[in-house]
Every structure is written in structure tokens, then in C-alpha cells.
Amino acid sequence: MLNNPHRRYNALTGEWVLVSPHRAKRPWLGQVEKLSPETLPVYDPTCYLCPRNERAGGVFNPDYTSTFTFENDFAALLRNPVEEEAASPHPLLVSAPEHGHCLVVCFSPRHDQTLPELDLPSIENVLTTWAKNSSDLAGEDAIQYVQVFENKGAMMGCSNPHPHSQLWAQSQLPNEIVKELATQTEYFKINDHPLLVDYVQEEHKRKERILFANDHFTALVPYWAVWPFEVLVTAHRASASLSELSASETSALAEVFKQVTTRYDNLFEISFPYSMGFHQAPADGQSHPEWVLHAHFYPPLLRSATVRKFMVGYEMLAMPQRDITPEVAAERLRALSDVHYKSIDK
Ligand code: H2U
Ligand code: ZN
């Protein structure tokens, strides 16, 4: 049945994806175009994220040696709560005040080292920086949610190759979290187990979509993946936030991140673009026994370093659709080496 067009249900968002495996038979395997490898300098005097350089507004970065966090100079959300505005002029023209914070986190002083090229202690350090910033922001008055994310690669709208990420904290729950909170809460009410804990256990029985796992985290291509090489990294236990992780869980997560991002880069032997982000529980002061900390990797590439999947037409107007099945995507990623191609002498 799964060789024919079918829909799959995304248990986390409650939405459906159209899968068309027969279309993947269009000839493409083997047509892997390679781009010439980019060589970035260790330090770029024109980069606004490198140590000691000037940012917009005339601020100079410190001579940092580890991660570096600063408040976004062009923040989408402003810190100070705005006064509640007058009631909407019409029930069809609704708005609501919103405030929050936007931080930028550089992974390291190195302009040229992306996540998979960092060593494990440095990846752990990025994770603990995200955890600390998240819990600081979550502790702020009226902050309901903290989003950690990385836009990687110009294809994903990243403005600067210096490896960095962002944190946005909001006074209301964003759309994706509203959906995931509803599905996880409902599942927990009925089953008395967290949805993602049960899901990952089921995936381990089947094995076909698993990429890599250790004691605390699993990386897999979700059953309901929309993007061709989408990956879900999920904790094995109910966990509300990054700051809740023990030292051994943080190490385990760093290992999974290195595995996933190395295989991504090895797929087309390029620095693989994606948008990645953690979904943490709402920072609403409530306990969240239903929530399982997880990260989504959404990479745009489909069949080579230059051919991307476009979310247009049917996707924009009707529903997401994919050709290559999640099982085939997982098989391809699993078959790749976990040694980064740049670290192999050719
Ligand atoms: P992205 O490349 O993922 O967009 O992140 C870079 C962020 O850095 C972007 O949000 C901010 C931009 O607003 N920025 C500064 O805060 N200061 C600068 O001097 C340039 C860019
Ligand atoms: Zn730089």
C-alpha cells in the first residue's frame, strides 16, 4: 500500500501530508551535482559576528573565545510590554499586543566551523548556552515561550555564514506550539503517556526510520515528514526544556546533533542548509508532563546540492506533498559515513 499515493497523519501537529512514492521513480539517483567546496576564513574582518568586529549601531563584539550571545540589533520583538491597545475595531480585524526578546548566539569565534565541524565539548557548550539563555528568558515576566533556532545556509535565508543561532521569546504561544501542545495534551489525557515517548518506542520496534540513537535521544525521519530529509531529534523521557537536561543527557544530545549534521553534510558533500529549532514546553509556570523536548531539522534540498524542494503550488494552496518516502530518506542518511567529508584526506 505504501508504494501508492497516500496521506500520512502528523500526530504532533494534527495535519496531513500527501506522499507520492511512485513519483520518486523519476530518474534522479546518481545525478548528484557537487558544488566546489567553500573555504571560509577562520576570521573575516568584514563579518559582524566575528570577535572584535563592529556590528550595526556601532557596537563592537568582545574578543570572545567560546559561545557569544547578544541582543539582536534588529529585534522582531521589543522588550517592553506595550499598553493593551483599544478593542479591535471589528471581529474580523483582530490584533493583540506582543512583546519579547531576540538574541543571537554565535557558536564559536571561528567563522568557518559549523556544528558538525565542532568537537563534542564545543557542541555541548552551544547546547548549554541555549539552555541558560532559554531559562533566563523563560523566567522573565509574561514570557510564555522561548524558541531556539538556527537558519543555516543562504538557501534558508541565513544572512551570514558565521555559524550562529537565534532565540526569540514571546509573550504568547506561537502557532506551531499551540498545535503541538493540543495534540500532546490530548494524547496524554487519553493514554497517560507522553505522545513522543510512545512514538519513539514504536519507531525503535520498526527501525526503518531511525538514523541514530543513544541512551537519551533518538534521531529519526518522522513517519509524517514533509521535507525530503526532515529529521526529528527527540528525548526519550518527558522533558519541558533544555535547561532540564542532566549533564549526561546534554552529552547524549551533542552526540546526536553531531551525527545528524555530519550525515547531512556528507549527503551532497556541502554545508547542508536547513532550519532547525527546539520545541520546548510553554514557559507558563505550569508542569508539562505531556511534553517531550525535541528538535526539528527542516532541510530544503531534494536531489543534489542545488536542487531544492519548493513548497509552492499544491503545498501553499492545499497540503504538503513529498515524493521520496521518509523510509527511503532515512535509509540514505543512515548509509552515509558519520565522519565529516572535510575531515577525510582526499
Ligand atoms: P540570521 O542570519 O539567521 O537571519 O541571523 C542573523 C541575525 O543577526 C539577524 O536577525 C542580526 C540580524 O537582525 N544582526 C544583528 O543583530 N546585528 C548586526 O550587526 C547585523 C545582523
Ligand atoms: Zn565571522
Image (cartoon, rainbow, N blue to C red):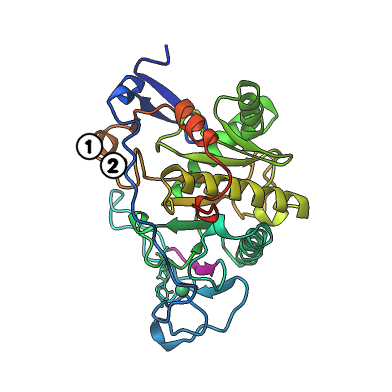
Mark 2: few, some, or many residues within 10 Å (few <14, many ≥20)?
few
Relative image position of residue 179 (x, y in whole percent): 48, 40
Is 171 positioned to the left or the right of 135 in the image?
A: left
Q: Specify whether residue 280 is in view.
A: no
Mark 1: few, some, or many residues within 10 Å (few <14, many ≥20)?
few
Q: Is residue 184 above or below residue 1?
A: below
Of the residues shown, which amino acid type is indicated by label 2? Phe
Per the image, is 21 magenta? no
Q: Disc 1 to disc 2, how far (Cα)?
A: 9 Å
Question: Can you tell which quarter of the image residue 94 is in?
Answer: bottom left
Question: Which residue was labeled with disc 1?
Answer: 313
Looking at the magenta stretch, what is its main secondary structure? strand
Depth check: give the residue in front, 204 or 148. 204
In the rendered image, the residue lying farthest to the top is 1
Residue positioned 39% across, 22% down in the render: 7
Q: Quadrant of ligand 1?
A: bottom left
Closer to viewer: mark 1 or mark 2 = 2
SS class of the residue under badge 2? loop
SS class of the residue under badge 1? loop
* Marks 1 and 2 in Cβ contact (< 8 Å): yes
Depth check: give the residue in front, 289 or 202. 202
Q: Which residues are magenta?
A: 98-106
Q: Which mark is residue 310?
A: 2
